[in-house]
Amino acid sequence: MSMLLDFHQPSPAIAPLVTIFYLYRSDEPVVEGIERADVGQIRFMLKGSGHLTFAEGHVEPSCPIMVNGPGTGAAAYRVEGPFHCFGAALRPVGWSSLIGIPAHERADHVTDGEAVFGPAGSALLEHLRTLDNVAAMAAVVEPFLLERARPVPPEHQRLCESVRQWLSSSDAPRVAALFDAIPLSSRQVVRLVNHYFGAPPKLLERKFRALRAATALADGADAREVAEAFYDQPHMIREIKHFTGHTPGTLASRMDPVLAMTLSPAAFNELAPPEPATPERA
């Protein structure tokens, strides 16, 4: 399969909202694969169209500008190629600022980006189709997004940062530690984490534990040692399968090539600290 996946770091101005830009290209007549449980994304379909099959079994078609909600499980995709796509991976604050829909309402769903961004979004897509590299595309998408960024309350930014630090603090973070770190009731924390991250803290705990375990196994770690973060080895296998679409065995032998490059949470910088210049409410 002839395939290219290039990444591009966002500028400091938009880094509080976007973790990474990327350009994917495949000229195969049909492109099929699995994407792991992911962060919210804006995807400009430069070429190709297809559909996604989500973890619970529902199928949704692609659209020219796809706003993918955060994933609570792995999703399978099939695209009639050639398939070229420019994307922006969003921080939770970025999802709220740029999309304006509670993340849990669009988790495991595709939202039509032309409905979100209007005719200007369609014009941007046509412009992107005239460009040939990820840096040039990022240079025109950044100002477009910054012009449309809505302010996010500072206290909500702080909560999102507390969640990021919690998820970064351990290979197996515990929800109780998050509740201890945030001066709100557990009910308020769950509501706001759902709103920004698209899932409650317990599911985030499971998701990142599974992604780290899958990354370690793909890198050759001993399965018995990796399984220590789970109840037992069958539990580890079920969790990895749910969040990556692969078993430990297929991670080692038949992993989807795109998944191989995006499996680790580090691939999309989703747990990297944001720049300090997030838009705030006056």
Image (cartoon, rainbow, N blue to C red):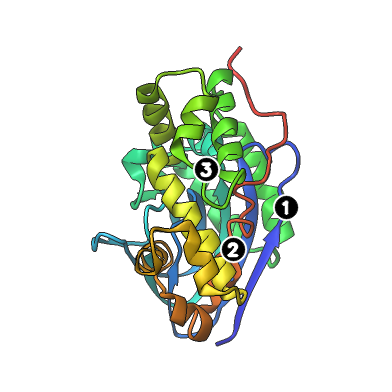
50 versus 150 height, above or below: below
Q: Residues within 10 Å of mark 3 (few under 14, many from 20)?
A: few
Q: Position of residue 113 (x, y in %)?
A: 43, 47
Q: Residues within 10 Å of mark 2 (few under 14, many from 20)?
A: some
Q: Position of residue 158 (x, y in %)?
A: 59, 25
Which quarter of the figure has residue 105?
top left
* Amino acid type indicated by mark 2: Arg
Q: Which residue is mark 3?
A: 120
* Amino acid type indicated by mark 1: Gln
- Disc number placed over residue 9 in the picture, else none: 1
26 versus 7 height, above or below: below
**Tags 1 and 3 touching, CB below 8 Å:** no
**Of the image marks 2 and 1, the number of the one nearer the N terminus:** 1
- Disc number placed over residue 173 in the picture, else none: none
| Quadrant in which the C terminus is drawn | top right
Which quarter of the figure has residue 212?
bottom right
User: Which is closer to the viewer, label 2 or label 1?
Assistant: 1
User: Which is closer to the viewer, label 1 or label 3?
Assistant: 1
Q: Residues within 10 Å of mark 1 (few under 14, many from 20)?
A: some
| Quadrant in which the N terminus is drawn | bottom right
Q: Which residue is mark 2?
A: 129
